[in-house]
Image (tube, grey):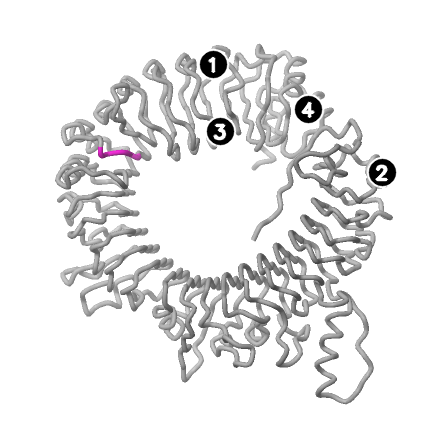
Amino acid sequence: MHDVALCVMGKDCLTIVGRPNQKELLSAGPARHLFLSSRVIGTLLDDHLKKQSPALQTLLYTYIRPLGPVPHLSKYSHLRALQLFELRKLPLRPRHLQHLRYLDLSNNELIKELPKEISVLYNLQTLKVCNCKRLCRLPKDMKYMTNLRHLYASGCTSLECMPPDLGQLTSLQTLTYFVVGSGPGCSTIRELCGLNLGGELELSCLEYVTEEHAKASSLGNKEELTHLSLKWSDDSIEELDQHRNVLDALKPHAALEFLGIYSYRGTAFPTWMTSHTFLQHLTELHLDGCTMCEQFPQFGQFKALEVLVLKRLNRLQILCGSNSSAAFPALKDLRIENLEIFEGWVATEQEESTFPLLENVRIENCPKLTTLPEATRLKVLELEEDKPQLSLSILKSRYMSYLSELFLSVCDTEATPTPKIDQDPEVSLSRMVLTGCSFLFPSSPLQPAVGVWKWFGQLVRLDIDSCDTLISWPEEELRSLVSLKILVIKNCSELIGLAEVKGCCTRGSLPNLTELAIVHCVNLTELFVLPPSLTSLTLEECHSVEFILGQGDATASSEHCNDLASNNMPEQSPPPKVNPLLCLKYLIIQSCNKIRSVPGPLDTLTNLNIGDCSGLESLDSLGDLPLLQALSLVDCKNLASVPGSNGNYSALEKIMIRYCPAINMRPLYGHLQRRCNSLEYKDLSHAGSSNPIKGPKLWEPKSWKYVIPRQWPVY
């Protein structure tokens, strides 16, 4: 379908994604519609427009860098649609945009105010300023934009109020965000009375609303509204009855699909929320920060409810009362956080039929909760607690037989006995993320592995974060993970390396592992024996690691196994010296200052990213790297040469070298000169400088005028 659309558009539309070729842009035909997701400086775009006769009607610019100056303004006077990103101010003057129908300035975190002249865009129908975090005010004369139909302002958290007389925009159909202000130059909520709004509406700063104004807003008559969010400020100090009266007066229509109430200070919810016949189409309900509330709706009365989020409800004890029938027939996603006295789910004996469709559950900081809801379809469970009381009960429960993803975060560092289970459960977990969870690892290398690990043979991805009892590589724990493909270990400050006892960690361990990431393990000195299946290796902020494969790198793994075997087996010839990383495609090393070299050759490598490695002296062992597509070397002050310098970089697409003063760059330019225009991404600025802030810029070819920032995956 995309190809068909391109064919129909013909020469009227020009789409440029990635680094633009100057010749390509300037030689393009007289396009009326431009979509640019690339770094195009304003003068280059201006040169293109100067040579074409048809007036530009659409300009959608979504690159992460500013468009820059656009002095040739006459070609923009017929624009119908304009989208710009990363602005401090609008580069085009509104008086040149009289035909504009669509203006999207979303995600511009630098822009603080819109030009006053925007109010003269009388033909504008859609204005988007979503997620402009610093935007404080909208133009005060917006009331004259009488053709405006859609105003999207969600995520403008710094917005102080709405411009005055907003009710004069009688064509307005969408208003996603309305901030109630306290000053004389602000619209009150009663300006909504005559507007036929639909879709989403968020009302913020409701502490400035009176009951009279709330009734005058006539929310109940806006039958096209599907999502309604009502927010008071966290620090509001109004009378509790005022909160109750205002919320009662803001009664929406009965067919609402989403309702969110935040920082409400009333002791009870109004009758329209507790009625068993109202809001029967509600699919998502959020209650957050209603700290004074003592009486809650019977949540099970919302028969269409699919998502329920409850946070900071200090006086909620039971989810459903004893008079509830089989509750939550449609609920799929349940999130409860910071419920101090919450104890249970239902006050009825028929608990089995309460959550028949529930698939995702998140529980955070509910210290009195000891059980999970009865949900036989549960797939994803996220649990965060101080002590592993609920975590332990989960590990020995029947939930393990149908969970696919488990996220456990337990802060307690005290030794906790793991559950003893007579029969191994059937476990279907494919992903597990452990934060803290010291109880799942032995506190000493001399202790045996915790028995639950043998259940996780189906596990595909494992993340271990901030585990203080993880001192040596968990060889015994990992041995059972025969299906594991991705292993991420980060922020384990006590992790040192291989245990001095136990058997050899052979390459038979983790036979299917393809991705390994180790991040911020500051005392780690060595890695375990890497399996030959590995295709991606990431090391970041591991300041004590000297060798990737152990001492001697390429021979370390075999020597390690040989040393252990020599104590238990008859004398035999040493194993051959081999490099196990024969399938490696991605190698990222960041802030590992003691690494001096990288094992090789790595003929399959396609992406190499090394930064802040002051101890690194050579990459010659990597070989010619015939398949290398992306190369990034940054702040490696002792690195003397680039890898693969004898090759021709025939596959190279992206290159960045900065702050590597010991590298002789001229041979590299010789290899790349013939291909400089075909590179998608090149940055050799400050390659010879040792100062990341100041320093001489090394010579580079004049044709290399595009500097495109790197984008690398982060674990």
Q: Residues within 10 Å of mark 1 (few under 14, many from 20)?
A: some
* Marks 1/4: CA–CA distance: 26 Å
The disc, 3 or 1, on the residue closer to the chain's N-terminal end is: 1
Looking at the rendered structure, the secondary structure element under dot 2 is helix
Q: Position of residue 208 (x, y in %)?
A: 22, 30
Q: Nearer the viewer, mark 4 or mark 3?
A: 3
Magenta stretch encompasses residue 172: no
Q: Amino acid at mark 2?
A: Arg
In the image, residue 693 above or below residue 470: above
- Gap in Å between the C-alphas at discs 4 and 3? 28 Å
- Determine the residue positioned at 50% across, 61% down: 465
Mark identifier at residue 94: 1
Q: Nearer the viewer, residue 690 or 4?
A: 690
The residue type indicated by label 3 comes to: Leu
Mark 1 vs mark 4: give the one in front.
Answer: 1
- The boundaries of the magenta stretch are 202-207
Q: Amino acid at mark 4?
A: Leu
Is residue 349 toward the left or the right of residue 150 in the image? Answer: left
Label 4 sits on residue: 25
Secondary structure state at the residue bearing disc 3: loop
Q: Which label is found at residue 110?
A: 3
Return the mark for residue 666: 2
